[in-house]
Image (cartoon, helix red, strand yellow):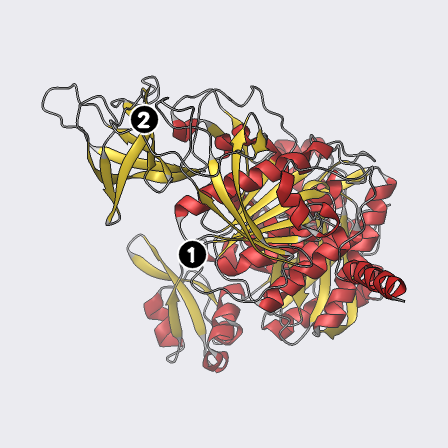
Amino acid sequence: MTATKNEIITKLRADLLGWEGFRPVAPEERQSFGLGPIENAFPNQVFPTGALHEFISTRPEFTAAIGGFIAGIIQTLLEKGGVCVWVSYTRRIYPPALKRFGVNPDRIIFIDVAREKDVLWVTEEALKCGGIAAVICETRLLSFMESRRLQLAIEQSQVTGFILRKDVKQLNTTACTARWTVKPLRSKLRPGMPGVGYPRWQVDLLKVKNGQPGSWTLEWKNSAFQHPQTAAIQQPVSDRRYA
Amino acid sequence: MPKRFVSIWFKYLLTDREAIRLKSLRELPVAFTEADHGRMLVMTMNALAEQSGIRPGITVADARVIAPGIQLFEHKPGRNIKLLKGLAEWCLRYTPLVMVDPPDGLLLDVTGCTHLKGGEAGFLKDLTGRLKGLGYTTRPGMADTIGCAWAVARCAESGLIVPPGAQRNALMPLPPASLRLGLDLLIKLRELGFYQVGSFIHLPKSVLKRRFGGNMVLRLYQALGQEAEFLLPLKEPVPYTERLALLEPIRTREVIENTVHGLIDTLCKRLYGEGLGLRSALLTYCRIDGKSGHLTIGTNHPSQRTDHLFKLFALQFDQIAPGLGIELFILDATKTEPASDKQNLLWNGKPGADSEEIAELLDNVGARVGKDHIHRYLPQEHHWPERAAGNTTDLAKSPESEWPEDKIRPVQLLEPPEPIEAMALTPDYAPRQFVYRHERHIIVQADGPERINHEWWIEDGGYRDYYVAEDEEGMRYWLFGTPNDLPGQTRRWFIHGYFP
């Protein structure tokens, strides 16, 4: 009896995922983003493409870290071809820097609108366009209704959307699949080595639909995400040395 | 097909315009004056002033005596041309070939246009009636040649439509002035007793040429159709154009949308048949009150898709002010290019993706936020950070060089760099701490300096020593110091970006 019950519940859960826009991924289509344990936090143990990801940033330093993290993800998305669209009204992203994260900056079309309210309009239009690999939208405000509109556009086109929310004062409910924060962490080289190491971040998955939120430490090294083994950050050597 | 021309003579062009502006002038004698050798002379006048005996060339003092209530205005040179140009544009609704004929006329090539208004008589009646409605008194003439139409419009008592091939008969009773001749020739002809064209039209060409010069012969034979005369259209007609005249003026958005959609569809079918695609188009609408407006669109790649082009126009429909109603739409394909079936843009690699879709997206976005807001960057071989990425609008262009990978650059770049208060212990070392926006950052690790010199062949200036600095919280910054080895200069510090 309990076995059948469990079966029914499992099936219902699977159905629910489908209704919520999660497609079951065939094993051969499964695309790894190299996120390691983070991918296990998502339903079906795969990073959801064709979904809306919301990134919360409160400081420009965080925005830079999020920029690097997103670039690392769209590197995989761009492997199949296509272009990215980066929509912003106050853009500071420096295109040549993206090369370090495996993205050819000429594969990104930057749309720098003059008014904030046009950002979401352009984003929605871009998300409707199936020929695009990913849309990154830098905005400040995103109401629930607006996020629903974006989500509906995505369900048609299966484009992956990244909403980078800067200067967020108050968090509101949105229809996004996942909500992230990425904060820079102290980088670390081998003990005793001076200088700044590889970019290292604390990635927090605050919310995820049907998944397990969590917190991870991630490093960008040799054009891939790495999970550093040691969690504790080593204190700097007492006599600070510079390169 | 024999050509048909219409000449419209605006007899009271300036005064009519003044009366349109000020209704009270309709009941008064009005004249325009201009200075000539220190005197003020009447240049042109309205019908009322003409009836009281005022003629061009009499002095203003005389005119005041003849018609005491006369309203005088000073003529501004070039005003008549400006008015005629406006009227010529208005006339584009009748034919695409309109020419301004200074000082007071228009010429229309109406070959193949008259049946739209129910024949030649109906055409002229409609044209003059509408101009009358605007407030202009006009006289039209229609003939096979420009010269004959001109002559009939200005000098004939009746028979304003000269049947095809009947120029000679039409010109016979007209005065020599109808041949567009100079004043000295007219005086000469009058002195010789030639009061009608018919009195000298039969003279041999050589005789006329010897006595009156080549110009007169040219004008006469142009009017007769034996010498070619060409019309210089106000607007060069575009090869791909569609027009739709509406029986009933329309003003609701829905009907306008349907009409425009239909127009685009017709044009697209034509372009498709010829293997062309549209790059830019101009939609002109004419309102029944004589005003007109334009909408323009541009596309990133040659397009023949009705829905896409319609969407581009639809984004601008808010700008259409239909007023009392729109009676005519003209859609011009101002730029066309050969369209290949498959557009192969640089990034077209994704299965199932078509780059046309992306180009159409960018058209839409460009129409809404402006084309200059769309950027794409290509690597430039410059080491100065601000110049390392070149902006391009061309979506198909591929990079000429590789993006440099060896240099570490910040993901967020401050443009321009912002000054910080920094404290460095030793001259060539990274700062120990810095204050930016009232926040103190203690630097624990740093890389650098990376010295970047100004590109002297572009710009002068000192070098910058860049440091990658990480503070206690793990935030990474791109800082630079200005030169410190020049006499009389202290090092200043700037923050230029954030690393991820």
Q: Secondary structure at mark 2?
A: strand
**Image coordinates for residue A171, horizontal then vertical, percent:** 49, 64
Identify the residue position indicated by label 2 in the image. Answer: B466
Q: Amino acid at mark 1?
A: Asp
Residue at image location 46% in from the left, 57% down from the top = B79
> What secondary structure is marked by label 1?
loop
Numbered circles on residues, count = 2
| Label 2 – label 1 distance at C-alpha | 28 Å
Q: Position of residue B108 (x, y in %)?
A: 70, 53
Circles 2 and 1: CB atoms closer than 8 Å: no
Label 2 Cα crowd, 10 Å radius (few <14 / some 14-19 / many 20+): many
Q: Nearer the viewer, residue B173 or B460?
A: B460
Q: Horizontally, is B159 left or right of B404 in the view?
A: right
Determine the residue located farthest toward the left in the rendered image.
B488
* Left or right of residue B274, residue B319 in this image: left
Q: Chain of mark 2?
A: B
- Asked if residue A113 is positioned above or below residue A80 in the image, the reply reads below
Residue A167: assigned label: 1
